[in-house]
Each structure stands twice: as C-alpha cells, then as structure tokens.
Amino acid sequence: VAVVGGLTLLGGLTGLDSSPAIAQGTSGLMEFRWDSDRDYRRLYYYQTSTIPNERAEWYLTLREKDRKTAILKLTVTVPDYFDSKLKPRRMALCKVTKGSMLSRTKCLEEIPATIEVNDNQTAIEVFPDQPVPIDGDYALLIKMFNPQGKRMYQFNALVQAPGDVPMSGYRGRWLVDMD
C-alpha cells in the first residue's frame, strides 16, 4: 500500500512542470555562409532572447584574440532590412565576462564612450573617451526589441586603431540568426 501511494505521489509530482524549456539565444553550432572567403572572421555574440518583438539585450563581442590593437573607434554596419529601432541611449560599450554553461555573458564595467547611429539606421559608431586596451574582452551592448520575422542578419565590425593613419580596418562579422 505504501509503495502504491508513493508511486501515485511521484506520478503527480512529475506532471507539475510540463512546460517545455526554451533555448537561449546563442550562436548555433553550424553556420551557413554563402560568401566563403579566406578573410572571413567570425565574431561571437550573445542574445538574451531570439523571439521576435521581445525585449532583448545583444552583446556583440570583440574578444581579446579577435583584436591586435587598441580601439580608437568602432563602426558596426547594420543591414538595411534590419527593422528594429536602434537608439544610442540604449547602447553601451562594456568590458564583459564570457558566458558558459553555468553563467551568462554580462557587462562588468561600462567604458565611457559616445555612441552615434546614422539617420538610415545602417551604422553604429562608437567613440571611446580613451582607446580601449588590447587586453580583455569587450562588447557593444544593445538593448532593444528584437526585429520581426525569422531572418539572418550580418553585422560587420570595423576598428580604427590609434596611429598616424586614421583608417578603419575590418575585424570580422557577427551573423545573428533570429528563430
């Protein structure tokens, strides 16, 4: 009788949490690229949500190994079909800690910077008050509502290093996939 009662209680408890788990918005294991070239550099990102029209935080990261120089200016190109509103006041340049299986990516320290978005919403320019040092992982944190639809977006990173030649160089691409 005790065994039957225990099995009944156990059966009742397993039905309490029947909602499926929702996957977090991280880059997938497989990436499709139609423009395959040797100069392609994949940059990593993290999203708190991939659901359309949901509030999310996007971390477009520049890891220490992705850069060889300090950052005087960061330019992020945005696709013209990206339909979410980009607001400079909802963005920050941060020193980040990388997420893992047991922890999430998060901003450790905000770096003072001026952030501008052009009128067409196709470029984000970040001007740190002081050059961002080579050591450590940094990210452009963007707080926004996710764009509508299931699409893939390619954001390009151009970095201007301190020096005599004021020219931005290609650092890599973030390929963001919306579920």
Image (tube, rainbow, N blue to C red):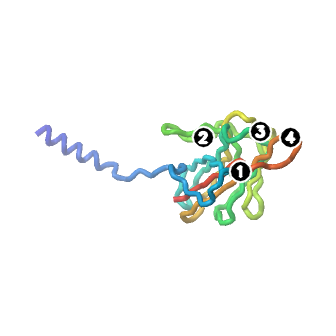
Q: Secondary structure at mark 2?
A: strand
**For mark 1, what is the residue?**
157
Q: Quadrant of residue 55?
A: bottom right
Q: Position of residue 175 (x, y in %)?
A: 61, 54
Determine whether, in the image, residue 140 is placed left or right of residue 105.
right
**For mark 4, what is the residue?**
163
Marked residue nearer the N-terminal end (1 or 2): 2
| Kind of residue sitting beneath label 3 | Ala
Q: Residue furthest left?
A: 1
Q: Which mark is residue 70?
A: 3
Marked residue nearer the N-terminal end (4 or 2): 2
Q: Nearer the viewer, residue 173 or 75?
A: 173
| Kind of residue sitting beneath label 2 | Lys
| Kind of residue sitting beneath label 4 | Gly
Q: How many residues crowd mark 4 within 10 Å: few (<14), some (14–19), many (20+)? A: few
Q: Nearer the viewer, residue 157 or 88?
A: 157
Report how far apart the C-alphas of labels 1 and 2 lie in the structure.
20 Å
The answer to whether residue 131 is above or below residue 17 is above
Mark 1, mark 2: which one is toward the viewer?
1
Q: Which mark is residue 106?
A: 2
Q: How many residues crowd mark 3 within 10 Å: few (<14), some (14–19), many (20+)? A: some
Residue at left 55%, top 40%?
Answer: 99
